[in-house]
Image (cartoon, rainbow, N blue to C red):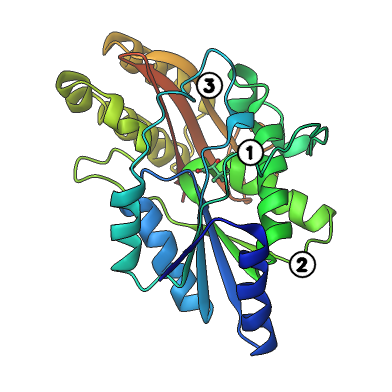
Amino acid sequence: MDTVQNLDELRQRIRNWRNAGEKIALVPTMGALHEGHLSLVRLAREKAARTVVSIFVNPKQFAPNEDFATYPRDEEGDLEKLRGLGTDLVYIPEPGSVYADGFSTTVHVDSVSEGLCAVSRPHFFDGVATVVAKLFTRVQPDIAIFGEKDYQQLLVIRRMADDLDLNVEVLGGRIIREPDGLAMSSRNLYLSEEARKKAAIFPQTLSAIAGDAASGEPLGPLIDRALKTLENAGFGIDYIEVRDGETLRPLETVGDRPARVFGAVVLDGTRLIDNWPVV
Ligand code: PAF
């Protein structure tokens, strides 16, 4: 496994693979890798001859009051995990090379980036779309893989790649959960022992909404009930909504189209997001 920081070196490796006719998959990450990320790398290995994992904690997707400075970083641990999976190349851009002095471009995606996480994190999707556009341009992958836990992010990136003809197939990897159902996330590390135990109530509540919605119960009362359960258990609520699984249009009832329950809560000062398909 090679680790590359320099852009020219990265381009050289990519060129060699392209010349050999090899398909390239990219898994963009911010490091602090857990089983969820590793499952995306395994999927990449199934889909392409070459797998590139990028590690970059992207300042543009954090607001000034958010956790950029304290976001967990563990480069050595990450490299160790990736080595075990047969990753071909880890791209860790040189600090300062991604947003050089004078950097002035923002990629903004309308529609799917409205509502849900954008309400409390209005800067977030522009920051994600901008960095991912840069990573796609640098790595030029055939396939790029993102976790479905950040489902809105996945749809924003897919829309951007289509709209800008980036020629990348954007795939989602399924959510990997802890034994009690909590979706794996680098931010789970922030939870105290007590909060960690309580956190499982969140996915349980989303899955209960999904189950009841699938059996035809009206969504309004279902969501009200879920909000009460979470509030009584000490969660702060950012949003709990049921939306179309492809367009993210808000739904009042579940029809024939795919639907998903989306939630974001705050527990013990830590923001958790998750989603559950209505099937
Ligand atoms: O999901 C993440 O880890 C990040 O938002 C991403 C896609 C790597 C962009 O910085």
Q: Which residue is denoted by mark 1 in the rendering?
A: 96
User: Residue at coordinates 44% horizontally, 60% vertically from top-left?
Assistant: 40
Q: Are marks 1 and 2 in contact (CB under 8 Å)?
A: no
Q: How many numbered discs?
A: 3
State whether residue 3 is above or below residue 177.
below
The quadrant where ligand 1 appears is top right
Q: Are marks 3 and 1 in contact (CB under 8 Å)?
A: no
Q: Amino acid at mark 3?
A: Gly
Nearer-the-camera pick, 164 or 264: 164
Label 1 neighbourhood size at 10 Å, few (<14), some (14-19), many (20+)?
few
Report x, y in % for residue 35: 31, 53
Image check: 228 left or right of 91? left
Spatial CA span between label 3 and label 2: 40 Å
The mark lying in front, picked from 3 and 1, is: 1
Q: Is residue 246 visible?
A: no
Q: Which residue is denoted by mark 2 in the rendering?
A: 167
Q: Amino acid at mark 1?
A: Gly
Spatial CA span between label 3 and label 1: 47 Å
The mark lying in front, picked from 1 and 2, is: 1
Image check: 34 left or right of 18? left
Could you say which quadrant of the image residue 178 lies in?
top left
The mark lying in front, picked from 3 and 2, is: 2
State whether residue 106 is above or below residue 190.
below
Residue situated furthest bottom in the rendering? 20
Query: Residue 220, which numbered label?
Result: 3
User: Residue at coordinates 61% horizontally, 85% vertically from top-left?
Assistant: 22
Report x, y in % for residue 76: 31, 50
